[in-house]
Image (cartoon, helix red, strand yellow):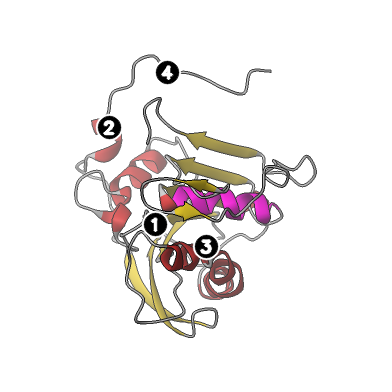
Amino acid sequence: MNLYQTIESLENTCPDSLCKSKENIKYPVAEHVKYYSNTCKMERWFNILLPPDYDSSKKYPVCYALHGIMCNEFMFLQKENSLEQIFTNLIEQKLTKEMIVVFPDIFARTDPALEQSFTIPVFKAYDNFINELTDDLMPYIQKNYSVLTGKENTALVGFSMGGREAIYIGLTRPDLFDYVGAISPAPGLLPSKDKFAEHYGMFTPQTFKYQKDDKAKFFMICTGDDDK
């Protein structure tokens, strides 16, 4: 089985049918929510996008969307090509199930004075998000929103640094996520050196494996030929 696919020609835009608002469609607005993180020992924020006709008597799958470095929980909610439009259009066209999408702040620092930068302490704060996600955020979402539980109902996707964390979390906790996606993931999963830093590595070549047992149903890594 060929696990790799190459796309010869790719248009660098989202189709209008998915990213543009349409008449007679109800588009939800993401809600900005504050909660307390025991991992970070401070109040933290996330955005949450509920399906257009959210019904608390129903249960929905949930997807966690992880932003890139130097960004925050608003990254995917810009006016142009906002996931508020994209997810709703996907649902309306029956290209995906109704779901809840959570946009966390994955800069899981424990020091309030630490500012975002391309440095090892900041990288470690991002890598700390696995603890906040599993110990604080996911329990909060399950307690306060009508979500289906179990790995078969839970997805994780990220861009750049968020992609690095999606891979790290997906491989470290395959018991929690059946769907994992990484778009142009940042370096640092393995020990390496680039123009920003010498990365300590979250895995070794021996431990960086897609486990045969308890693996995700779908694990996707997207990158371009010239990604740097």
Which residue is label 4 attached to? 7
Badge nearest the viewer, 2 or 4 = 4
Which residue is label 2 attached to? 17
| Residue 53: mark in rendering | 1
Residue at mark 3 to residue at mark 2: CA–CA distance? 36 Å
| Residue 127: mark in rendering | 3
Q: Earlier in the sequence, mark 3 or mark 2?
A: 2
Q: Earlier in the sequence, mark 4 or mark 1?
A: 4
Q: Is residue 137 magenta?
A: no
Q: Earlier in the sequence, mark 2 or mark 4?
A: 4
Which amino acid, by three-letter code, is at mark 1?
Asp
Give the quarter of the figure containing the N terminus. top right
For label 1, the SS is: loop
Residue 103 in picture, x, y percent from top left: 40, 60
* Up/down of 29 relative to 170, above or below: below
* Up/down of 175 relative to 185, above or below: below
Main secondary structure along the magenta-highlighted residues: helix
